[in-house]
C-alpha cells in the first residue's frame, strides 16, 4: 500500500513493494488532477521521514503544480491569466493540463505575470 501524507487522496497498491512504487507516481498525478479541476492549491511535500520512499514528480509537472498554486494564491482564474498573458483561455488550459507538453518559457511567463519567478538551479 502506498499513501502520501500531504496528498491523502493519492492511494495505490501493488502485489510487491516494487509494483506499488511503480504505481505511486500515477496515483499522485491523478490526485493532482482533482486539485487542478477544483482550482485548489496542491499541498507542498513535507520532509520524508528516515527510510521513507520518495516519489519524484517530473519537473514539467511540478512547474504546473507551482503555477496552479500561484494562481490560487493570487485568486487568478484561467480567464484572467489569459488576459494578463494576452493569450486565449484555451492556451491557458494547456498550461494547466498535466498531460500537455508545455514549453518552460510559457510557464515562466505565466508565473511572472502572477508576481513570481520560475528559477532553474543546477547543483
Image (cartoon, rainbow, N blue to C red):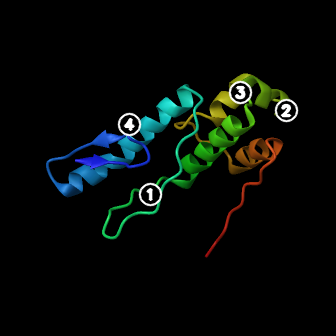
Image location of residue 63, percent across then percent down:
62, 49
State which mark lies toward you, 4 or 2. Answer: 4
Label 3 vs label 4, nearer the camera: 4
Residue for badge 2? 84
- At 71% from the left and 60% from the top, the residue drawn is 119
Are the residues flagged by discs 1 and 4 in contact, CB closer than 8 Å? no
State the separation of the CA atoms marked 1 and 4. 17 Å
Q: Residues within 10 Å of mark 3 (few under 14, many from 20)?
A: many
Pick whichever of labels 3 and 2 is earlier in the sequence. 3
The residue beneath circle 1 is 56
Q: Where is residue 115 drawn, in percent x and y? A: 81, 46
User: Camera-side residue: 58 or 54?
Assistant: 54
Dot 3 falls on a residue whose secondary structure is helix
Q: Which residue is painted at 47% across and 57% down in the image?
A: 46
Q: Dot 2: what SS?
A: helix
Task: Check disc 1 and report its element: helix, strand or loop.
Answer: loop
Q: Is residue 7 left or right of residue 87?
A: left
| Residue assigned mark 4 | 9
Amino acid at each position: 500500500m502506498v499513501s502520501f501524507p500531504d496528498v491523502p487522496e493519492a492511494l495505490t497498491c501493488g502485489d510487491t513493494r516494487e509494483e506499488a512504487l511503480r504505481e505511486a507516481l500515477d496515483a499522485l498525478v491523478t490526485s493532482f488532477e482533482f486539485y487542478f479541476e477544483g482550482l485548489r492549491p496542491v499541498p507542498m511535500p513535507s520532509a520524508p521521514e528516515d527510510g521513507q520512499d520518495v516519489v519524484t514528480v517530473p519537473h514539467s509537472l511540478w512547474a504546473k503544480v507551482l503555477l496552479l498554486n500561484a494562481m490560487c494564491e493570487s485568486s487568478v482564474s484561467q480567464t484572467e491569466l489569459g488576459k494578463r498573458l494576452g493569450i486565449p483561455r484555451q492556451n491557458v488550459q494547456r498550461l494547466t493540463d498535466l498531460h500537455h507538453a508545455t514549453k518552460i518559457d510559457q510557464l515562466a511567463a505565466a508565473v511572472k505575470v502572477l508576481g513570481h519567478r520560475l528559477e532553474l538551479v543546477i547543483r
